[in-house]
Amino acid sequence: MSKQSPSERLFALAVEAGLQVTDQRFAKFMDEKDELQAFRKEFHYPKMKDIMFADQSLVDPEDDCVYFVGNSLGLCPKKTEEYMKTQLEKWSKIAIHGHQHGELPWVSCDECVDGDMAKVVGGQHGEVALMNGLTVNLHLLLISFYRPTATRHKIMCESKSFPSDHYAFESQIKLHGYDPAESLVLLEPRQGETTLRTEDIVARIQKEGDSIAVICLPGVQYYTGQLFDMPTITKAGQAKGCYVGWDLAHAVGNVELHLHDWGVDFACWCTYKYLSSGAGGIGGAFLHKKHEKNDFPKLLGWWGHNLDTRFVMDNDMDISPGIYGYRISNPAGMLFPSLKASLELYNKATMPALRQKSLLLTGYLEMLIKKQYGRPVEKAEDPDEVYVDILTPSDPEQRGAQLSLAFNVNIHRVIDELFKRGVSCDKRLPRVIRIAPVPIFCSFEDVHRFMKYLQQSLTAAKAQGSVDHRVDNNHV
């Protein structure tokens, strides 16, 4: 893509096609130009008639729904059923021999897939393992990297961390006999702002880094959709002697990652959001090569033992190098077929190509929202008008696919009306509805349809009650 912003690029393409950017024909034109459009057909895309809460009198039952919640649960790849069936047939026909034989042998099914996973996160061979769930992996890695001392006992995170991360940090601090009130460094946005500035994070690291053991932030913040400057923050933290890790739940499969090249110490993620591995899908973990032979404390299990001697069963631990040594239990064989199906698609599409489409797709959504519901700049606001604030950074390089929308209308009413129109999205209290057009299976026409349903929903929500004048536009 050129140095044009997504909106500039979209306007240029509209002029080239002789169309208005707000016209549905332009959305169709963009889909026709989309080199990734065929990937949509590789997923089961729910129909309006099958969507819970959809009012069939308001939509065409045979239309695809508007699925903008892939940041919470990705759609099911069509290959998943085939790959899962293969494993069930193997279990039913050869039973225990399936550990060593057939597609995705259960004894090594994780290693059959982790190479494809490494491509998505920018890891080298042996730096990525697929195991457990995200928070379990976070705990396992913190046991190694959070080794507090009297002078360096703090964990730095953001004040609005995802609850599971926050609980993990607090529990690790307490486990070592420290007080979270003193050992948890919480990053807050500036007064009147909703996202963190990189320069403020770096300044805080430089100021307090000597007392910080671990910095752990999200690659993409779940509530605001902000994409953090991971390489800059990692470098700043390590310069002060801190270990730097990342929760990539909302970043993996969403933005380009180069964990090895960035020198990230550790990372963990789930795979059921953008990566479409299915509800509760297997988690992932990254450990940089520089820590491959570490002697850090860690919890051990049988599967961390080298494969060559694992079945000698002499209880003399011969630990696998790197992240493989953090594996505790044998891999969950029935969770890998769906991830295999998804990773095949993501690596075929490639993350750079998906990112370029995502910049335009989310840019298109942002442009239409601002055009229709943006607050006026040169005149006073109409107290009875509906406005939509976008909490996600306007800089495309500081966000992924998601836009976090805040309304001066009751969001419970708004989302109920969107549900009636077959729009799949979610709300995060106190006042955000998250919208994520995932580029591998969403289209420009989906964005245009969403805007139609949003207008209908806001009109219906407003009719149920007046505009809320008490909304604090700076409150996250």
Image (tube, rainbow, N blue to C red):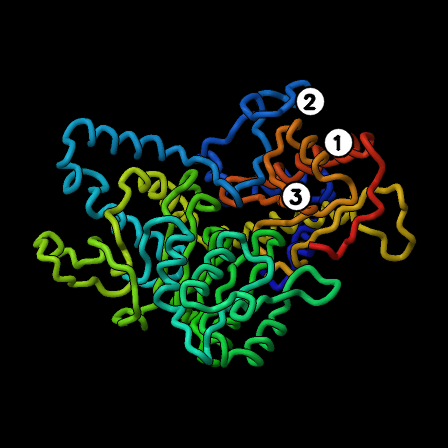
Please name which of the two marks, 3 or 1, marks the residue nearer to the observer.
3
Question: Which residue matches tag 3?
Answer: 433
Question: Which residue matches tag 2?
Answer: 58
Q: Bin the neighbour count of mark 3 within 10 Å (Cα to Cα): few under 14, some 14-19, many 20 and up.
A: many
**Real-space Cα distance between discs 3 and 2?**
21 Å
SS label for mark 2: loop
Which residue is most to the front? 177
Return the x and y of residue 47 as percentages of the image width and height: 54, 25
Kind of residue at badge 1: Gln
Question: Which of 426 and 46 lies nearest the eye of the viewer?
Answer: 426
Q: Bin the neighbour count of mark 2 within 10 Å (Cα to Cα): few under 14, some 14-19, many 20 and up.
A: few
* Left or right of 159 on screen, residue 171: left
Q: Are marks 2 and 1 in contact (CB under 8 Å)?
A: yes
- Quadrant of the drawing holding the N terminus: bottom right
- Quadrant of the drawing holding the C terminus: bottom right
* Residue at 81 percent of width and 34 percent of height: 462
Label 3 or label 2, whichever comes before in sequence order: 2
* Residue at 49 percent of width and 72 percent of height: 154
Label 3 or label 1, whichever comes before in sequence order: 3
* Residue at 30 percent of width and 34 percent of height: 83
* Left or right of 441 on screen, residue 106: left
Question: Which residue matches tag 1?
Answer: 456
Kind of residue at badge 2: Leu
Which residue is most to the top? 57
Return the x and y of residue 335 as percentages of the image width and height: 33, 40
* Left or right of 332 on screen, residue 476: right
Kind of residue at badge 3: Ile
* Residue 125 visible: no
Q: Could you say which quadrant of the image residue 203 lies in?
A: bottom right
* Left or right of 409 on screen, residue 357: left
